[in-house]
Image (tube, grey):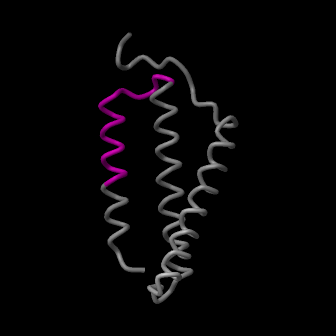
Amino acid sequence: MSVWTMSGTMDWPGLIPLVFFVWVFAAVIAIGELAYSERRGALPARPMLTALRRWLVLGFGFTACGFINIAYDKGLIATWQLIAVVLVLMAVGCWLNTRKA
């Protein structure tokens, strides 16, 4: 099979449960981090803004990773493309995590 041969298509309506689960999971992580910071007594200056930003970063990151994984499983992208996109997502995530809210 050629690297450039597409063996399937993305089933967009079938991805709705994945997207829902990913965003709920991201919200649980963001709320958990906020609760942990409160318990330690180390709340940031704007706790809700920090939690919202963390939720958005995690939600978009997890959603992108889920879509990329499905595209790779269906043969829509090659291995080198998978590695490149994951590295870019990791770099952007690290950059967003070091910025102040």
Q: How far across and down, in percent of the image, does residue 25 sit?
A: 59, 55
Residue 94 higher or lower than 98, as above or below:
above
Relative to residue 55, is residue 79 drawn left or right?
left
Q: How far across and down, in percent of the image, does residue 74 sit?
A: 51, 24
Instruction: Please count the marks in the image.
Output: 0
Residue 94 higher or lower than 99, as above or below:
above
Q: Closer to the camera, 100 or 28?
A: 28
Q: Quadrant of the N terminus?
A: top left
Residue 79: image quadrant is top left
Residue sticking out furthest to the bottom: 45
Relative to residue 76, is residue 100 drawn left or right?
left
Q: How far across and down, in percent of the image, does residue 7 sit?
A: 50, 17
- Residue at 41% across, 29% down: 77
Q: Closer to the camera, 81 or 20?
A: 20
Q: Quadrant of the C terminus?
A: bottom left
Residue 18: image quadrant is top right
Q: How far across and down, in percent of the image, does residue 64 sit?
A: 48, 47
- Residue at 58% across, 30% down: 10
Q: Main secondary structure of the magenta part?
A: helix
Q: Magenta part of the protein: which range?
A: 74-90
Residue 16 higher or lower than 49, as above or below:
above
- Residue at 67% across, 50% down: 20
Is residue 88 rendered magenta in the image? yes
Residue sticking out furthest to the front: 40
Q: Closer to the camera, 97 or 78?
A: 97
- Residue at 44% across, 85% down: 42
Residue 100 higher or lower than 66, as above or below:
below
